[in-house]
Image: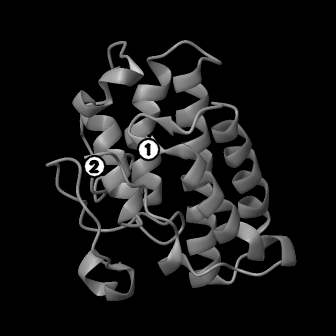
Amino acid sequence: MRMVRDEPELERDAQRYSTQPLPPYRYLPGLHPHPQANPHGHSYGADDEPHPPWLPEKWRTLDGWCHGVDLCNAHFYWESHEAWEALWHAVPRRSAPHRFLQGLIKVSAALLKVRLAMLTGKDIAGAQSLAPAGLELLASIGCERYMGLALGEHIAALHVYFTPLERDELPDICASPLILLDD
């Protein structure tokens, strides 16, 4: 199993927004034990309680949001999806926060597919469908800033990043855009 310390190419100096530690490995389906279902998984036995309702303007108090950002910025794509999913389930369907988190979850899944394709040579069809779907959901929010994120700028950076997928090429996972939040 490739542990985080075994992947120096993925290390980058990104601001942390939560105090939660990063897991010991970046879960890649088919290559690592499933974090929750496998007794050897990094999150096996962790509580999976529903998140209480929350408001987007209180984003600084949402540890799941901030930890998900940290995870995504550190290339823990599956784990960021999990951190955000609890928040996603706690807001009304089709609301702005629901679409926002669903968009980020899809983008994170697309990044996971890019990473898997890099390591295994698998096809990139999943990334090619997930990336535009995620970007469309993020664009549907219709504002420049949301939950501390310069959303318009982030969407533009993601568009540029995912452009190689349109040519059936892999973008460089090490160059994926950081999620930068307001101070």
User: Can residue 123 be seen here?
Assistant: no
Among the 4 quarters of the image, the one containing residue 16:
bottom left
Is 25 on the left or on the right of 119, as rendered?
Answer: left
Q: Quadrant of the N terminus?
A: bottom left
Q: Residues within 10 Å of mark 2 (few under 14, many from 20)?
A: some
Instruction: Indicate the amino acid at tag 2.
Output: Ser
The scheme the figure's colours follow is one colour
Is 94 on the left or on the right of 67, as rendered?
Answer: right
Q: Is residue 79 above or below residue 48?
A: below
Where is mark 2, residue-wise?
A: 43
Question: Gap in Å between the C-alphas at discs 1 and 2?
Answer: 28 Å
Q: Which of 75 and 13 is in front in this view?
A: 13
Q: Is residue 67 above or below residue 156?
A: above
Q: Helix, strand or loop at disc 2?
A: loop
Residue shown at the point (32%, 45%) measured from the top left? 182
Residue farthest to the right?
167
Q: Which mark is residue 13?
A: none
Residue shown at the point (34%, 84%) measured from the top left? 7
Query: Residue 99, image x and y in percent?
Result: 61, 29
Residue shown at the point (71%, 52%) measured from the top left? 130
Where is mark 1, residue-wise?
A: 149
Among the 4 quarters of the image, the one containing residue 138:
top right
Count how many numbered circles sit on residues in the image: 2
